Amino acid sequence: MTRLVPLPLVLPLVGAAVAILTGRSRTIQRVVSLTVLSLTLVCSVILLVEVDRSGTLVAHGGGWAAPMGIVLVADRFAAVMLVVATAVLLAVAVFAIGEPSTERNHVAFQSVYLILAAGVSGAFLTGDLFNLFVSFELMLTASYVLITLGGRRAQVRSGMTYIVISLVASSLFVTALALLYAATGTLNMADLSTKIATVSPGLRQAFALLLLGVFGIKAAIFPLFFWLPDSYPLAPSPITAIFAGLLTKVGLYAIVRTQLLLFAPDLPTGVLLWVAGLTMVVGVLGAIAQDDLKRILSFTIVSQIGFMIMGLSFGTVAGIAALVYSMVHHVVVTTALFCAGGLVEFAGGSSQLKRIGAMLRSAPLVALLFLLPALSIAGIPPFSGFISKLSLVIAGFGANRAIIVSVALGVSLLTLYAMMRIWVGAFWSPHEESVPTVNPNQVGRFGAPALMIAPTAALVAATLVIAAAAGPIFSFSERTAADLAHPRTYVSAVIDR
Amino acid sequence: MTITLDACAAVLFGLGTYLVLQRKLSRIIIGLGLFTHGANVLLIASGRRGVPPIIGSDTGPMSDPLPQALVLTAIVISFAVTMFLLALAYRSWQLTDDDEVADDVADRMLSRDTSPGEDVADQAESMPEPVEVEVEEL
């Protein structure tokens, strides 16, 4: 079973090489891409089942023992994120193939996309901080190419901001690694988890905050989110969907992993609470101020990141369980929402709310596919967002954090308002006569190509499944949270072999 | 020795930060190069000094090879990303004939008026769209 652990990382890399070699034929490229992602998904599901049944799996690179060699660790948290991420990557790959635009016809699209997949898998599976850096770079470099694919003027401008910010974050990451290595002499996370105790408490706090800042830039938490609503909306829709669904969550995963594994006893709770509250509030206020569908959605994900940081900041097992469930829910629902947003933009011809309207009549299926995840992200029962928010609220009261919980509930209400603005602007309101009309691309009966509709519908169905199967998923989240709250199991699985 | 390296890293960080905050793209890129090198120098400084860690040379304490291996990886990564940035800056210069980082249109619209009128929205739409140049295949 240990042999399966490196596969989610290796398969996409091999696929990327094959895809670039077969660049002459788009069909072969697509077949390779979809096959590789499907195989990766199968591997991830097997890993998840196996890890949940018989404990953490560790693969030692080259047979070297843990603190010296390179390790890949699949524990419950990594495995579940891997399954969700790969499923979402597969759905968006189909969506990108279905979308008739110039970007997806680019020769490099499929291979760069697979490299992104490899980076995401690597970030989830890696057992040491330096490989986390390498995986991040793999993922980010691929994302630089994807976000500027097509090379339009606005894309180049926003892509530049995105790359500069990410590169500064990466340099800070290297700085943090240098300081950590100088202080402890190791970068293996399990090893660090025990050795960090020898470092003075003040220095430990400084490391915790430094890593929070580094990953906070990627996760788009409060003072560091400004690049996200600026750069995401300008990329092609499938790329925005995968970035919004996955990349910020990989940053969040790194925050959760490092804070709980390395700094668990003295978590910077006060800082996390403030960051969570401000991220939620500022994000949702930004969403309300915008007038463009993709920008509203981009600000909404910033605000939702705040909810998950809130779960972490409680520092209780219940809080972490709610966080794990929320992450699973949020990856799927955000991607579904952005895919639906892409459908609206495609069928309506624009993403500016002033320029589209009355789409409930012209594209009813698109309206339905948008409405379900929109209600879910706002936390309306019976959708998965409701269960996520409910568990967070219960955990918050359990940890005696009534103020932040009330802030969170207020933010949920404003999220609903932001979603309803899109709903009214795009689906209900009539076309404004004064605004020059845009030519909508009506294709087929549903308003968009079937290959765009089908993956969106699958993602929306997945959010409904996450809500319907909330019992088993949440009890799994609780087991994951118990693992995360007690780093000893992780450490003994990695070191004692 | 470590003091020299640390001071060097500090200077690189300082200069890099100053240059990244400029408005010209070329300066930002040079600034980023300095900034990443500051981080790399710091990574080198995190290891132990000593004789080369080769079997047979067992006189005195050996140097720690791990930070050097790490820094090689970090250098390669920052090199690749800097090259990509340069290509993008060239593309930006091709499209705008300028080296300056442009403002975000939507941000400007929001700051001018919280609910932009049709004329502003139209201006944004009718911004001189660049000539679609086919991107060179990789």
Image: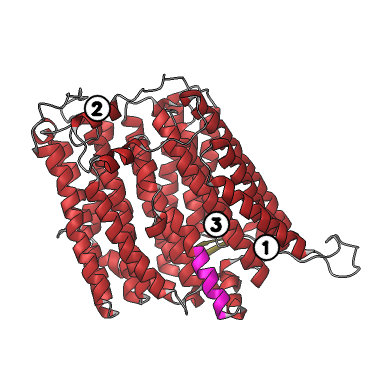
Quarter where residue A384 is shown: bottom left
- Whether label 3 touches label 1, CB < 8 Å: no
Task: Identify the secondary structure beneath mark 1.
Answer: loop
**Distance Cα–Cα, label 3 vs label 1:** 19 Å
Name the residue tied to disc 3. A132
Residue type of the residue flagged with mark 2: Asp
Between disc 3 and disc 1, the foreground one is 3
Between disc 2 and disc 3, the foreground one is 2
**In front: A236, or A109?**
A236
Residue type of the residue flagged with mark 3: Leu
- Magenta: main secondary structure equals helix
Residue A324 visible within the image: no
Name the residue tied to disc 2. B122
Density class for disc 2 (Cα within 10 Å; few <14, some 14-19, many ≥20) is few
- State the image coordinates of residue A63 (x, y, percent, origin top left): 66, 61
Residue type of the residue flagged with mark 1: Trp
Density class for disc 3 (Cα within 10 Å; few <14, some 14-19, many ≥20) is many
Q: In the image, A391: left or right of B86?
A: left
Q: Tag 1 or tag 3, which sits nearer the N-term?
A: 1
Between disc 1 and disc 2, the foreground one is 2
Q: In the image, A287: left or right of A192?
A: left
- Which portion, as a residue range, is magenta? A201-211
Quadrant where the C terminus of chain A sits is bottom right
**Distance Cα–Cα, label 1 vs label 2:** 62 Å
Q: In the rendered structure, does residue A97 fall within the stretch colored magenta?
A: no
Please name the residue shown 47% across and 76% down the image: A264
Name the residue tied to disc 1. A64
